[in-house]
Amino acid sequence: MGSIGVFDSGVGGLSTLHAIRQAYPDEHLMYVADSGHAPYGDQAASAVIARAQAITHFLLDAPCKAIVVACNTASVVALPALRAMTSVPIIGMEPAIKPATLATRTGVVGVLATTRTVQSESVQRLIAQFGGSVRVMLQAAPGLVERVEQGYLADEHTRDLLTHYLTPLLAAGIDQLVLGCTHYYFLRPLITSIVGGGVTVVEPAEAIARQLGARSNLIAGGRVLEASAAAALQTPHAVTGGFAFYSSANDLPQAERILSQLWGDGLAGRLQQLPV
Ligand code: DGL
């Protein structure tokens, strides 16, 4: 037994949580929003690793039988350190560069992500591995995580920021836009309205739902999940269901309002202070 733990620097990972809930309705899920320490993407790798380790300790103590790092930034810098802590499966995510490079017709792919993710070795490795003759344009997008954390998903300032980041990518002729940060999922309607119908927006939440729903051993943007992890996630006799939500935000009522806005059902009165 045990829960499935899911964490992010804040509310972005709710998109992944939703996909997991769809696929595993009987599992007990724990979600940690580390909003008191967001954004991760503007911090030193060592600071992100320290937070990811503290949250992983908390989830392991719960106990959790699998942990999903629903944050590209934490995944690209902290996964080896987290996996060294435990034999419990730790599932990470990385920008969906591979499917985008396979799908492009213009030969130009845009990746919108945090500064830390854009500068990571993982992303360089993905480009080296799958880029081929495709031009992969990396665009760091500081400020967007904060807009989502504050619940500003469609206002003028958020639109201006997005327009600023997307204009060079559009000018270069992208036809695939990879959302390399789970927070950006919640900006998708605005992003789509800016990039128009000629650009496919690629993000992993639906792929996770598909793969988990099929009880496959693939998860998180095409990433291969070890067989043990796939087995651990499948507990056909468990009927526990349910959620526990934790946040490190200083203003818990405000955090609960934003989480409720994004999660969309019965979170009221259920958000607990993260003790780490
Ligand atoms: N949702 C996180 C990601 O996927 C945001 C990181 C941040 O806090 O900057 O990268």
Image (tube, grey):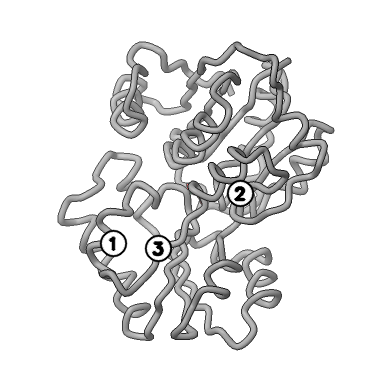
| Residue highlighted by disc 2 | 220
Circle 3: element type: strand
The count of marks equals 3
> Quick one: 137 or 188, which is closer to the camera?
188
| Residue highlighted by disc 1 | 192
Alpha carbon separation for disc pair 2 and 1: 22 Å
Q: Position of residue 120 (x, y in %)?
A: 62, 64
Is residue 80 found left or right of 91 in the rendered image? right
Indicate whether 142 appears above or below 13. below
* Label 2 crowd bin: few (<14), some (14–19), many (20+), radius 10 Å: many
Indicate whether 200 appears above or below 78. below
Q: Label 1 is placed on what type of residue?
A: Thr
Which part of the image, by quadrant, shows the N terminus? top right
Which part of the image, by quadrant, shows the C terminus? top right
Which residue is located at x 42 percent, y 68 percent?
A: 177
Which residue is located at x 81 percent, y 41 percent?
A: 227
> Quick one: 17 or 24, which is closer to the camera?
24
Residue 168 sits in which quadrant? Answer: bottom left
Of callouts 2 and 3, which one flags the residue occurring earlier in the amino acid sequence? 3
- Pointer 2 with pointer 1, Cβ within 8 A: no
- Pointer 1 with pointer 3, Cβ within 8 A: yes
Indicate whether 256 appears above or below 194. above
| Residue highlighted by disc 3 | 201
Q: Label 2 is placed on what type of residue?
A: Ala
Q: Label 3 is placed on what type of residue?
A: Val
Q: Position of residue 142 (x, y in %)?
A: 39, 59
* Label 3 crowd bin: few (<14), some (14–19), many (20+), radius 10 Å: many
Alpha carbon separation for disc pair 1 and 3: 7 Å
Is residue 186 found left or right of 59 in the rendered image? left
